[in-house]
Amino acid sequence: MTKETHRFALSFSAGKDSFLALKRMVEDGHVPACLITSVMPIGRSHMHGLRIPLLEQYAESLGIPILFDTTREKFDRSMALETARKAKTLYRADASCTGDISLSGPRDFNLSIAREVGMTGFYPLFGMDEETYVRELTASGFTVMIKSLSAALELDELVGTKLDEKAISLLAQKGVRLTDDTTDIHTVVVDGPFFQHPISYRFGDSFHKGRFTMVDMLPVS
C-alpha cells in the first residue's frame, strides 16, 4: 500500500520546534508547501519578534515560500482561517503542521482550523519525552541560538549563545524542560539541514523585557 503524502504549510517561528517538526515531516515523505508566520503591524513576528527581512531571508535560504499577515494586532481565529485558505490557494497545501509538544490547547485550535479549511493536521512532536527530544535535537545538525531566557534562571550569560550540550545541561540543572511549550527559553535556528546558506544576522546587546533577558536579532546584508 502506497503511503499518502501531503504538501504541508508549516507554522514557522524560526525556533527549534518548528525546525524539528519540518525535519520529521520531510523524513516521513511529506513536502513543505509554505511557511506560515503571523506578523504584527510593526513588522515583527508574534512568536520571536523577528523582523520581516529576516523572515524573508529564512524563506530564501530554505527554498520555501513564506506567508504572513500584517493586518492585525493580535493573532485570532479569523486570521488563522484566512491564512490557511491562502496556503491552499497559493501553494496547494493540503495539510498543516505545527511544532506543538505538550499543550493540547494550541494543538486542538490548529487542528480545528485545518479541519475547517479541509486540511489534514500534523503534530509530529506532540507528546515527545524530554530524553528523546534532547537526543534528536542534539543530533539534528541544526545550529540553535538562545534568543531569550527567563531572568529568574540567573543564566543571562547564555543569552545570545549556542544551545549546545553544555547549555542544555545547565538549563536542566535549573529544571528547564525543552519539551515544555510554556518553557522559559526561546530559540532561533540559524543554520543546518534544509538551509542553502546560514542566516546572515547579528545579535544586539542583551536587555530585560518583562520576565525575560533577551537579545534582538538584526539582519546583516
Image: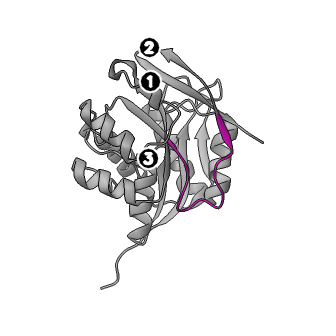
Quarter of the figure that contains the C terminus: top right
Q: Is residue 63 above or below residue 46?
A: below
Q: Is residue 51 above or below residue 132?
A: above
Mark 2 vs mark 3, CA separation in Å = 22 Å
> Which sits earlier in the primary sequence, circle 2 or circle 3?
3
Give the residue number, with chain letter if any, for mark 3. 16
> Which sits earlier in the primary sequence, circle 2 or circle 1?
1
Q: Does dot 3 land on a helix, a strand or a loop?
A: helix
| Mark 3 nearby-residue class (10 Å; few <14, some 14–19, many ≥20) | many
Q: Which residues are magenta?
A: 188-202
| Mark 2 nearby-residue class (10 Å; few <14, some 14–19, many ≥20) | few
Given the image, on which type of amino acid does mark 3 rest? Lys
Regarding residue 68, the answer to whether it shows in the image is yes
Give the residue number, with chain letter if any, for mark 1. 156
Q: Quadrant of residue 171?
A: top left
Mark 1 vs mark 3, CA separation in Å = 20 Å
Give the residue number, with chain letter if any, for mark 2. 210
**Residue 135, percent across and down?**
30, 56
- Horizontal side of 218 relative to 102 (left or right) equals right
Regarding residue 120, the answer to whether it shows in the image is no
Given the image, on which type of amino acid does mark 1 rest? Asp
The one nearer the camera, 17 or 107, is 17
Q: Does dot 2 land on a helix, a strand or a loop?
A: loop
- Horizontal side of 206 relative to 5 (left or right) equals right
**Residue 214, percent across and down?**
50, 24
Image label count: 3
Between circles 1 and 3, the one closer to the viewer is 1
Given the image, on which type of amino acid does mark 2 rest? Gly
**Residue 122, percent across and down?**
35, 56
**Residue at position x 65%, y 23% from top?**
42
**Residue at position x 35%, y 28% from top?**
184
